[in-house]
Image (cartoon, rainbow, N blue to C red):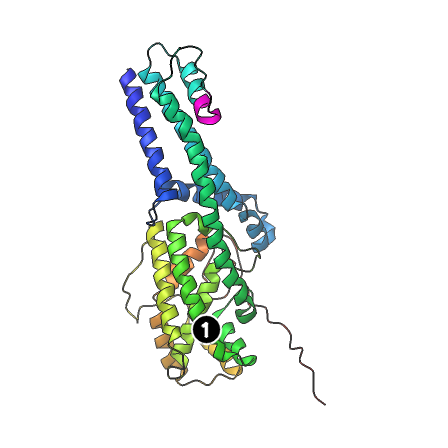
Amino acid sequence: MKWIYTLAGAVLLLVTVASILRTLVVPRGLYSALVYRWWSSLRVVLRRFAPASGGYQAQDKAQTWLAPLILVGMLSTWLVAMLLAYTLLLFGTTADLGWGVAFREAGSSLFTLGFASGDRLHLSALDFLAAASGPLITALLIAYLPTLYGAYNRRELEVTLLQSRAGEPAWGPELLARQQLVDTETALPQLYRDWERLAADIGEGHSNYPVLLSFRSPRPNRSWVVGLLAVLDAAAMQLSLCPRSAPPEARLVLRAGFTALRDIARTLRIDFDADPEPDQPIRLTFDEFDAAVALVGASGIKRERPVDEAWLHFKGWRVNYEALAYELARRTDAVPSLWSGPRDFPATPIPPSRPADRRPKLT
């Protein structure tokens, strides 16, 4: 029977090492079952701890703990799996070694760099391998944290800058309207360029390190998903309503945006249509679009197309990213902004806040 325990320990050790490598080392956007299971289970647990009467604010406060708990859960899972694997290997490969002694020796080697080997006089290669495994896992996770927080800081910097342009929570039509109201519409091309680069960064970083999806913005009404969706909607509306005057950067940010969402979706194994037809139905309704066009028009933007025709073009753009943006907003429990889809908790869409006009009145 000893060989069965040895084989089980070797398989468990290989599976654990593979999980560590695919999660922390391999820069390829590989699916991490461990991260996803911790993410999905902890989301449910934290949601139940949030008071039902607290609305989104309570959910956001509870979900703040999701990212650190996932990181702790990852480390704990790997260390416990290593402990069980080396216990099985020591028990299976060493004659007359009981379960208690094998467990104590594996734990001593793995966690303290010591060797609780008073019951036998020699150390094996397994002892030294176990002694190296614990610090190596911890070192890899420590080196992993600066990468995560570097990507997080780059993301949140642009999300914070978007607040003054698109409101909080961000909304695409509000972005267009504000630029017209404060005479900064010429800044839109640079905004699109910044978010084109950020979309590429998000697509690369969040697909390689999906635990980043659980890191929330410092402010409850901010979210990278909602921010990206707002920029994409603003670009799509501008191209649909004003095709001649819209900057070429609008097309580029749209392409970068839905490409990033698709890269993340592939990592999370979310099904999507890679080449949707432009006349496919979307969840946003014409009435919602028409009301947004009226808002944008009231700010002073002059349409170059009638609303009915612009709606067809807008649908053709939004069909490329709407479903994925809604799904990621749902999974990340993002702020329920306008045009961002449903959530897993009762939520009413929150319109963006607009500061009062404080310009002095000339008499």
Identify whether 334 is placed above or below 245: above
Quadrant of the rendered image containing residue 360 = bottom right
Q: Quadrant of the C terminus?
A: bottom right
Magenta stretch, overall SS: helix
- Residue that extends furthest to the right in the rendered view of this protein: 363
Location of residue 27 in the rendering, given as x and y in whole percent from the top left corner:
34, 48
Q: Is residue 48 visible?
A: yes
SS assignment at label 1: helix
Which amino acid is tagged 1?
A: Gln
Residue drawn 42% across the image and 73% down it = 235
Q: On screen, 216 above or below 143?
A: below
Q: Magenta segment range?
A: 107-114
From the image, tell me which residue sits under label 1: 190
In the rendered image, residue 64, in percent from the top left (x then y), is placed at 55, 48
Q: Is residue 237 left or right of residue 50?
A: left
Q: Quadrant of the N terminus?
A: top left
Q: Is residue 223 visible?
A: no
Query: Residue 192: x and y, percent?
Result: 43, 71
Place of residue 199 in the rendered image (x, y in percent of width and height, measured from the top left): 41, 62
* Residue in view at x 41 percent, y 43 percent: 35
Would residue 113 be counted in the magenta stretch? Answer: yes
Q: Quadrant of residue 4?
A: top left
The structure residue drawn at horizontal position 34% and vertical position 56%, both measured from the top left corner, is 263
Q: Nearer the viewer, residue 279 or 147?
A: 147
Q: Work out whether 247 lies above or below 61.
A: below
